[in-house]
Image (cartoon, grey):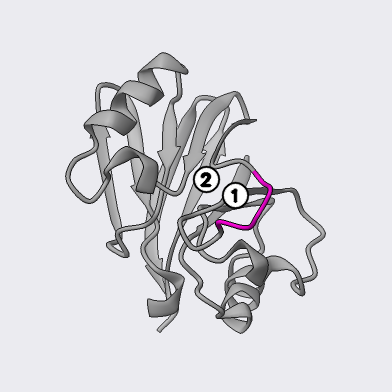
């Protein structure tokens, strides 16, 4: 079983990233953008899967990424390129096109989880508000928890 920590929208809250890592002790970290530069000074001894958000315009990392964790295909994006503040339709099409089981996104600063068309959409919320998410994955089975630090 793997524990995945999902963060987004840290907006210069480096200390909060470290608090989440200490509290959750994950096997890997997904960062859905805004501000990816916050990870520079965080000491990580686990895999990091990060994408850039709308505030990361100077970053050279991609705006979307697909990773496999315990045979689950996870699509990671910030969401601003897919109009996630209006609907998840564009993100749903992208997920189906890429056969993703899970989609992790941010941008809205609204913590949410939705299952649609056999795809789990997870927005961990804004780390600046102490919000994040965790996924426990065991082969094709997974559970999602939306959490708050404070």
Q: Secondary structure at mark 2?
A: strand
144 versus 43 height, above or below: above
Tell me which label, 2 or 1, sits earlier in the chain: 1
Q: Which mark is residue 136?
A: 2
Q: CA distance from mark 2 to mark 1?
A: 5 Å
Q: Secondary structure at mark 1?
A: strand
Quarter of the image where the N terminus is located? top right
Q: Is residue 40 magenta?
A: no
* Residue labelled with disc 1: 3
Q: Is residue 58 magenta?
A: yes
Question: Which residue is rendered at x = 52% and y = 33% of the image?
Answer: 74
Whole-percent x, y for residue 82 in the image: 33, 38
141 versus 51 height, above or below: above
Whole-percent x, y for residue 34 in the image: 50, 63
The magenta stretch is: 57-61
Quarter of the image where the C terminus is located? bottom left
| Label 2 close to label 1 by CB (< 8 Å) | yes
């Amino acid at each position: 079983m793997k524990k995945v920590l999902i963060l987004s929208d840290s907006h210069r809250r480096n200390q909060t990233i470290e608090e989440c890592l200490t509290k959750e002790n994950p096997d890997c970290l997904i960062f859905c953008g805004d501000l990816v530069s916050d990870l520079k000074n965080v000491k990580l001894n686990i895999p990091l899967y990060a994408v850039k958000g709308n505030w990361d315009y100077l970053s050279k990392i991609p705006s979307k990424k697909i990773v496999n964790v315990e045979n689950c295909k996870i699509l990671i994006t910030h969401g601003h390129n897919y109009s996630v503040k209006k609907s998840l339709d564009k993100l749903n099409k992208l997920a189906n096109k890429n056969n993703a089981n899970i989609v992790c996104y941010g941008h809205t600063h609204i913590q949410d989880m939705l299952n649609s068309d056999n795809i789990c959409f997870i927005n961990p919320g804004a780390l600046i508000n102490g919000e994040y998410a965790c996924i426990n994955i065991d082969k094709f089975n997974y559970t999602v928890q939306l959490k708050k630090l404070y």
